[in-house]
């Protein structure tokens, strides 16, 4: 497995390859990230993973400084699952990046309400990666469903010939969606965090037969009783993310909460 740290070395390396399957990450890898890599390995060509904590997607009051960084362990995991090349650019990779705007309709909803800078920062850094790598395929987790839709929209409108693949959410045995931020939870918070996916699934299973606003109010109440601060609890159209009042096919139930300062998101597509 090749480990590359400079843009120049990456450009030289990539000259030998035509089909690049790209998995962008911020490191602190877990089985969710690795499932994207396994999926990428199924396609012809080489699998390239990037590890870069993107400062453009963090606001000054957010957790950039404490975001877990575990590069040595990450590289071991990637080697084990036959990743071909890892790009770990230095922090100055984000300097001078062309600032782009994510699709306004998609990026103003859900996570974009409390984090207005967030998706613009993501699209800007991804464009920087994509222009350099020109990937044939890119792989994104459906855990970050809104991010997946926004990147898909961005690629559809760009001149890049890149296909996007959404990969299902990988969960801990107790149901908690895997996330690098789970490592920031105390053992007690970690036990409570597992309830998030239970409430998500229970609510989703009732969506076809009960009033959605009733389910939303009840869901928020239950979460608050468990000390979650609820950012949003939304039944929405899974293509536009518009809030809906009545169940329709492919409704997305998306939730974001804060538990002891740790932001957790999860979602369930109700078919
Ligand atoms: P991050 O390192 O948080 O930027 O995530 C990198 C990629 O891994 C994104 O496409 C995420 O959606 C994906 N990812 C993170 N957690 C999971 C998970 N539990 N299941 C599936 N994909 C995930």
Image (cartoon, rainbow, N blue to C red):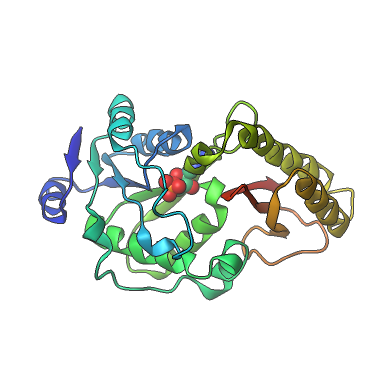
Q: Is residue 158 above or below residue 136?
A: below
Rendering coords of residue 19 (x, y %):
25, 46
- Left of 229 or right of it: where is 263? left
- Left of 3 or right of it: where is 149? right
In front of the other: 119 or 63: 63
> Does the image show residue 251?
no
The residue sitting at 33% across, 28% down in the picture is 77
- Left of 255 or right of it: where is 142? left
The residue sitting at 11% across, 50% down in the picture is 9
Q: Is residue 56 above or below residue 18?
A: below
In front of the other: 98 or 252: 98
- Left of 100 or right of it: where is 205? right
In front of the other: 270 or 266: 266
Q: Is residue 38 above or below residue 271?
A: above
Rendering coords of residue 90 (x, y %):
22, 53
The residue sitting at 56% across, 53% down in the picture is 145
Instruction: Kindly indicate the quadrant of the structure image that contains residue 155.
Output: bottom left
The residue sitting at 10% across, 51% down in the picture is 12
């Amino acid at each position: 497995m090749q480990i590359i740290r400079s843009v120049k070395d990456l450009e030289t390396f990539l000259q030998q390859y035509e089909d690049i399957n790209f998995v962008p990450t911020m490191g602190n890898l877990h089985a969710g990230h690795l499932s994207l890599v396994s999926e990428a390995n199924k396609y012809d060509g080489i699998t390239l993973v990037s590890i870069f904590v993107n400062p453009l997607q963090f606001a000054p009051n957010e957790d950039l400084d404490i975001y877990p960084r575990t590069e040595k362990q990450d590289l071991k995991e990637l080697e084990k699952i036959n990743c071909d090349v890892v790009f770990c650019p230095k922090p100055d990779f984000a300097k001078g990046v062309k600032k782009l705007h994510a699709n306004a309709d998609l990026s103003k909803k859900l996570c974009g309400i409390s984090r207005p800078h967030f998706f613009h920062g993501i699209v800007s850094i991804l464009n920087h990666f994509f222009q350099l790598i020109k990937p044939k395929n890119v792989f994104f987790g459906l855990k970050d469903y809104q991010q997946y839709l926004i990147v898909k929209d961005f690629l559809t409108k760009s001149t890049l010939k890149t296909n996007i693949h959404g990969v299902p959410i990988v969960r801990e045995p107790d149901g908690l969606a895997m996330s690098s931020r789970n490592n920031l939870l105390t053992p007690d918070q970690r036990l409570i965090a597992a309830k998030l996916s239970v409430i998500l699934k229970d609510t989703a299973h009732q969506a076809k037969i009960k009033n959605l606003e009733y389910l939303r109010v009840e869901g928020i109440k239950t979460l608050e009783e468990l000390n979650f601060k609820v950012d949003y609890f939304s039944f929405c159209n899974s293509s536009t993310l518009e809030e809906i009042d009545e169940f329709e096919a492919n409704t997305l139930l998306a939730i974001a909460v804060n538990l002891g300062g740790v932001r957790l998101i999860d979602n369930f597509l109700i078919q």
